[in-house]
Amino acid sequence: MMRRNPLAAALSAAALLLCLWGGAAPAHEGHDHGEEAKSAPAVTAPRGVSSSDAFEVVVVARNGALMVYVDRTGSNEPVTGATVQAETPEGAVTATATPDGAYLVDAHWSEKPGAYDLTFTVTLADGTSDVFPVELEVPEPPAATAGPPTAWTSGLAIAHDFQHHLTQADPMAFVIGGTGFVLGVGLTLLLGRRRSAPAVAVLVLAAGVVLAPRANAHEGHDHGNEPKTLMAAPNGASRDVAQRLPDGSVFMPKPTQRLLTIRTVVTATSALARTTEMPGRVITDPNASGVVQSSVGGRLSPPPSGVFPRLGTPVAKGDVLAFVTPPIQAVDASDMRQRQGELDQQIAIVQRRVERFQKLAPGGAVSQVQLDEANAELSGLKDRRTALDKIRLQPEPLIAPVSGVIAEANAMAGQMASPGTMVFQITDPAKLWVEALSFEALAPAQNASARLADGRTLTLNYRGAGLADRSQAVPVQFAIEGEQPDLRTGQFVTVHASSSAPLQGLALPRASVVRSANGQALVYEHTQAERFEPREVQVEPLDAARVLVVSGIGNGKRVVTQGAELINQVR
């Protein structure tokens, strides 16, 4: 039979007793444990805002100074090189420009709480100026607060709360039942003659708690009045951080906006052309590219420079890029030697005939015509002999057909090239085309643009469309306007060709549209100087750089065009 530990049995009994008490404790009115701990919001420095149709001024008080930020209202671009004069309670002060584009005003009076009416005059380099009234309110600093609770104070609070619950239960029924239970367990332990001192101590403690006198009934008992730790910061220690507010908007201080280069544009409805999106790739201009091939099979050898041209090497039309030396078979060599012997024999015979005619010509035995014919025959035989030697010894030069750079090279010393093998490919990087596949009929000579994977755009000029079916699509070719040194043949692009049907809508850069957590398209509206609100929109592709906003936002709204993705990441 397994023996039981009296201390474990006592602990179990005490736990059971407390559970019974917990189920019997009734609810009591007015008992409030206070709100759960909440994360304290970030404290922002006192600030004031004023704006006009052209400029927007934000004033931030911190550490006894005013930071003045002047931006253009429409584009949110910082205004630098201006003269800013402030009318303060201590008189007129001229602001000092800072390296980050802001303006600094010495204002020790801003450390005292109160409401201040300020006036700022901004004068640009061209002489134009504007006046901005700003209301700046410096709040009272928060009162000193208690520090974080210690282990001792936390234990006292738990004991106080535990006793409070005990005092709210029915005393008679609970005391009678609890006392009997405790005495029964204690008697059992004593009769067992075990080392029961720890168990008895636990039971006495439980009984003391249970039999504690009932406190007077108290209504409105509120534990929420207990000391709490508050997160607050004085004016000098305030911090401005970008944060997402409960309504979904984003608070972004002016310094952060300038660090992230946030830019905006004012929306306006205009007549736009609908575009067709097509897949495409970069190809070479057929009139500005060429291939170098061997007309006869032979062994490759370097050009007169001694080295083959490398990839990317500029070449000019007519340059010798390599040589091809045709191989001579044994049979061919035997035939050539035989022909050389025959030619040498004929040359010797004709040579003696010419010499004889030259001796007889002065005496009239041989006419001049016979002498000239003999000389002509000798000259022809020598030319044939020389040409036969060249066939055996002179290789075929591979000449560049166009000017450009080496785009592909397949040359190696000693390599055997078959007839028609492409040894070099030459491309002019300043003259590249784009070939796209269209699944619908396109009007000729229409405007088009292409978008690369890195977001860059290319301006295209229509060159023509084919009639052949290529996977149920028609190839359309465009010439790239301007030189693009970073492009490579075969690089994939997305082509946007405009159609003739005009549309009315809002055009925004593609960088303005971001995705929410549920995949909805969003744009951020600059509603206040340091506040951005998300707007759900419906968009359609317009061209390589812009999208058409169908619904979700109207005219005259300031929409973020640069940095929207960064704003969307603020949490």
Image (cartoon, rainbow, N blue to C red):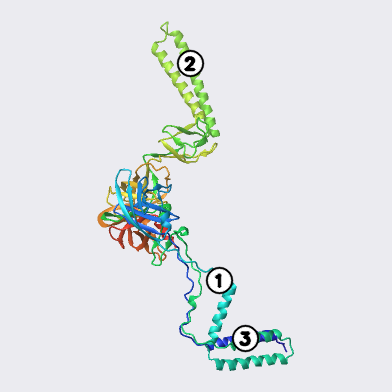
Furthest toward the front, the residue is 90
In the foreground, 388 or 369: 388
Residue type indicated by callout 3: Ala
Upstream in the sequence, badge 2 or badge 1?
1
Q: Nearer the viewer, mark 2 or mark 1?
A: 1
Mark 1 falls on what kind of element? loop
In the foreground, 378 or 275: 275
**Can residue 529 be seen by looking at this rendering?**
no
Q: CA distance from mark 2 to mark 1?
A: 127 Å
Where does the image place residue 345, in percent across and percent down from the top left? 51, 21
- The crowding category of the residue bearing disc 1, from other C-alpha atoms within 10 Å (few below 14, some 14 to 19, many at least 20), is few
Which disc, if any, is residue 206? Answer: 3
In the foreground, 249 or 228: 228
Q: Are marks 2 and 1 in contact (CB under 8 Å)?
A: no
Residue type indicated by callout 2: Gln
Q: Which residue is mark 2?
A: 351
**Can residue 486 be seen by looking at this rendering?**
yes
Using the image, determine if residue 247 lies above or below residue 504. below
Residue shown at 55% from the left, 80% from the top: 160
Which disc, if any, is residue 149? Answer: 1
Using the image, determine if residue 402 lies above or below residue 114. above
Mark 2 falls on what kind of element? helix
Where does the image place residue 461, in percent across and percent down from the top left? 32, 45
Residue type indicated by callout 1: Pro
State the image quarter where residue 272 is shown. Answer: bottom left
Upstream in the sequence, badge 2 or badge 3?
3
Q: Nearer the viewer, mark 1 or mark 3?
A: 1
